Image (cartoon, rainbow, N blue to C red):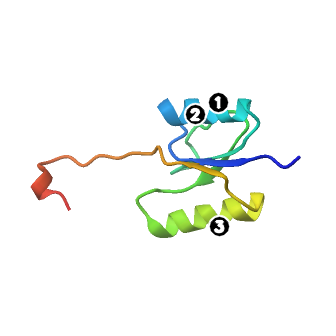
Amino acid sequence: MNHAVAVITGVSSGIGNATARALVARGYRVFGTARSEASIVPEKVERVLLDVRDGESIQRGVDEVLAKAGHIDLVVNNAGGSLDGAFEETP
């Protein structure tokens, strides 16, 4: 069967986790990104090690998904990060 392929960042909790589960239930082949092997991903979601703050990591992750699935139909860029401090003092 040729499933639609989704890549979702930040699947270990919150909106990313819920989105991954919903897409799996709708028949998508879902790849969920995580920064480490220890991160928990929902059942039936294929883990891809990827750090959205690192361009080389992103390229490796995309290459991995394309090697396994051949295409990507949907990207949900859900992962977030934060910096502490005054805006004008952040890099």
Quarter of image, res 21: top right
* Residue picked out by circle 1: 22
Image marks 2 and 1: residues in contact by CB distance under 8 Å: yes
Mark drawn on residue 19 = 2
Q: Specify which label sits upstream in the sequence, 1 or 3.
A: 1
- Rounded to the nearest whole Å, what is the CA distance between mark 2 and mark 1? 5 Å
Q: Which residue is drawn at 46% across and 67% down?
A: 55
- Rounded to the nearest whole Å, what is the CA distance between mark 2 and mark 3? 22 Å
Q: Residue at x 77, y 36 (%)?
A: 27
Disc 3 secondary structure class:
helix
Quarter of image, res 89: bottom left
Residue 7 position within the rendered picture, expressed as x and y whole percent measured from the top left: 61, 49
Compare residues 12 and 2 and report the one nearer the observer. 2
Mark 1 residue crowding within 10 angstroms, few (<14) / some (14–19) / many (20+): few
Quarter of image, res 40: top right
Compare residues 35 and 90 and report the one nearer the observer. 90
